[in-house]
Image: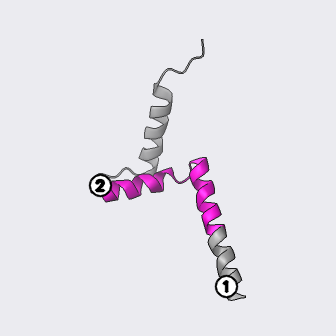
């Protein structure tokens, strides 16, 4: 019984992690992990990170015609 419960918890965790990756909710955590791995000293706060993401998204012209 414990094995089945442990297996179900593992699957649920993987599903939740995949869902967060797919919808972009884990973007800041991924940025922070990458910055730490590269040894960056000035890591953006969550608010600064999302403002930068919005600037990148809306700074490029995006017209169909």
Quarter of the picture containing the C terminus is top right
Per the image, label 1 sits on a secondary structure element best described as helix
Residue 29 picture location, percent across and down: 46, 56
* Point 57% across, 17% down: residue: 63
Q: CA distance from mark 1 to mark 2?
A: 38 Å
Give the label on residue 38, or none.
2
- Asked whether disc 1 touches disc 2, contact meaning CB atoms under 8 Å apart, the reply is no
Asked whether residue 16 is drawn in magenta, I would say yes
Q: Mark 2: few, some, or many residues within 10 Å (few <14, many ≥20)?
A: few
If you read the primary sequence from the N terminus, does the residue marked by circle 1 or circle 2 appear first?
A: 1
Q: Give the residue at the far bottom of this rendering.
A: 1
User: Range of the magenta residues?
Assistant: 12-40
Q: How is the image coloured?
A: one colour
Give the label on residue 3, or none.
1
* Point 29% across, 51% down: residue: 42
Residue 29 vertical position relative to residue 57 in the rendered view, above or below:
below
- The overriding secondary structure of the stretch rendered in magenta is helix
Viewer-nearest residue: 44 or 7:
7
Residue 7 vertical position relative to residue 55 in the rendered view, above or below:
below
Quarter of the picture containing the N terminus is bottom right
Per the image, label 2 sits on a secondary structure element best described as helix
Q: Quadrant of residue 64?
A: top right
Asked whether residue 58 is drawn in magenta, I would say no
């Amino acid at each position: 019984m414990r094995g089945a419960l442990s297996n179900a918890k593992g699957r649920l965790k993987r599903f939740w992690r995949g869902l967060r990756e797919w919808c972009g909710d884990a973007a800041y955590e991924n940025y922070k992990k990458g910055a730490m791995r590269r040894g960056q000293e000035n890591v953006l706060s969550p608010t600064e990170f999302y403002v930068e993401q919005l600037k990148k998204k809306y700074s490029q012209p995006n017209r169909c015609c």
